Image: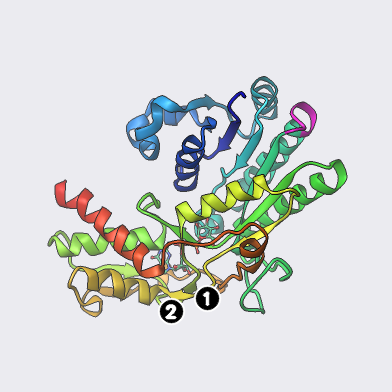
């Protein structure tokens, strides 16, 4: 039997790289879409893929160019496509709304249209987010909770979710949205709060800086472990029927708790170093998000394997390894 072929958009990111690891371990032929700038600077831009560069196939394709997407899909005939690429840092979406909305929605639309026409057997996963719930009035949120996005990023994801649903219902495509809550790992980008906290806490520990400025310490997030969440993506495409699922830990923790744990693993008292900076607060942010993963646990037998405390510990240990040697 020939190997199953997967195409991942956003493969260099945290999720894309863990998903590539998972699919390789399952015997897939793994293809990924990257920007030209990534190929020109593999050392930095493809650092999450360094250990598997010889085992995957990278294609320089622009997600805003429908013709190049069509050509790739037609030539490659993937069995599964995971659409993870997007501008995903919520704060940037307040600064550059127009291009973020256009790029995030158009890339999803182009990909769905290309697959419908030229590889209709291909199963599609779309990366949705808890930001789609935005200012949700219900807690915990589940698949029936009304969307109420509070950022352009969230709006772009809600629009893409409806495109995915429409292609599933109108054209019978096997297309699913995973509504993923925050998920963290040693490969998390430095702009996100968990990586910012661990990297700065380690710098403080090493005497390289004195203090850390953060936004709202009393924001609550539902934090999970990224390898568990890419497993959920894969499970969705192995199901008998396409559907949408919330992927969450079911627990909510404050940024303050994350800070306190990270600093205490290093033997530090966070109150001596951490300062709240109102400039880092987000406009109209929902400060409490918590998901209910009941549906995916029951229907696809998914479960998380790593706790909040274990995530903090692993991220600190990794950061000590990077900075302690550097
Ligand atoms: N980044 C950042 N920097 N966030 C801060 C800071 C800070 O200095 N101080 C407090 N926060 C708070 C944010 O206001 C937010 O409530 C929380 O920390 C988490 O922020 P991020 O780590 O930037 O993640 P996010 O919740 O905005 O979004 C992440 O998760 C979503 C899924 O729930 C991203 O991965 C999104 O792409 C993803 O969709």
Q: How many angstroms separate mark 2 from mark 1 (CA)?
A: 7 Å
Q: Nearer the viewer, residue 49 or 43?
A: 49
Residue shown at 61%/42% (left/top)? 83
Confirm if mark 1 falls within 8 A of ligand 1: yes
- Disc 2 to disc 1: CB gap under 8 Å: yes
Element under label 2? loop
- According to the picture, the residue beneath numbered tag 1 turns out to be 287
Q: Nearer the viewer, residue 268 or 20?
A: 20
Residue shown at 24%/64% (left/top)? 201
Residue projecting furthest to the left: 207
Confirm if mark 2 falls within 8 A of ligand 1: no
Question: Does 201 appear in magenta?
Answer: no
Give the numbered dot on residue 38: none
Few, some or many residues within 10 Å of mark 1 (<14, 14–19, 20+): some
Give left or right: position of 267 versus 9.
left
Q: Nearer the viewer, residue 226 or 46?
A: 226
The residue stretch that appears in magenta: 116-121
Question: Does 117 appear in magenta?
Answer: yes
Residue shown at 18%/67% (left/top)? 210
Q: Taking 272 as reference, is 194 above or below it?
A: above
- According to the picture, the residue beneath numbered tag 2 turns out to be 218
Give left or right: position of 30 versus 261.
right
Q: Nearer the viewer, residue 319 or 215?
A: 319
Give left or right: position of 253 versus 97.
left
């Amino acid at each position: 039997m020939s190997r199953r072929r997967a195409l991942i958009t956003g493969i260099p990111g945290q999720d894309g790289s863990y998903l590539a690891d998972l699919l390789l371990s399952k015997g897939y032929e793994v293809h990924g879409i990257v920007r030209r700038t990534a190929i020109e600077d593999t050392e930095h831009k493809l650092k999450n893929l360094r250990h598997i560069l010889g085992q995957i196939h990278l294609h320089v394709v622009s997600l805003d160019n429908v013709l190049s997407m069509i050509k790739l899909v037609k030539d490659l005939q993937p069995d599964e496509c995971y659409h993870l690429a997007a501008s995903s840092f919520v704060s940037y979406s307040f600064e550059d709304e127009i291009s973020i909305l256009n790029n995030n929605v158009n890339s999803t639309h182009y990909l769905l249209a290309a697959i419908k026409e030229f590889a209709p057997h291909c199963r599609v996963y779309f990366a949705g987010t808890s930001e789609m719930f935005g200012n949700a009035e219900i807690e915990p949120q589940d698949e029936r909770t009304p969307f109420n996005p509070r950022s352009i990023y969230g709006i772009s994801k809600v629009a893409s979710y409806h495109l995915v649903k429409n292609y599933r219902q109108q054209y019978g495509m096997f297309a699913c949205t995973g509504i993923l809550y925050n998920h963290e790992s040693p490969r998390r980008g430095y702009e996100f709060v968990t990586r910012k906290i661990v990297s700065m806490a380690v710098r403080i520990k090493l005497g390289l800086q004195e203090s850390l400025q953060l936004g709202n310490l009393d924001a609550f997030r539902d934090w999970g472990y990224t390898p568990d969440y890419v497993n959920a993506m894969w499970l969705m495409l192995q199901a008998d029927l396409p559907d949408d699922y919330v992927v969450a830990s079911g627990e909510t923790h404050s940024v303050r708790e994350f800070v306190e744990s990270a600093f205490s693993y290093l033997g530090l008292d966070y109150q001596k170093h951490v300062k709240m900076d109102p400039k880092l607060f987000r406009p109209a942010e929902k400060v409490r998000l918590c998901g209910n993963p009941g549906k995916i646990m029951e229907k696809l037998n998914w479960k998380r394997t790593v706790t909040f405390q274990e995530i903090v510990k692993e991220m600190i240990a990794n950061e000590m390894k990077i900075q302690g040697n550097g």
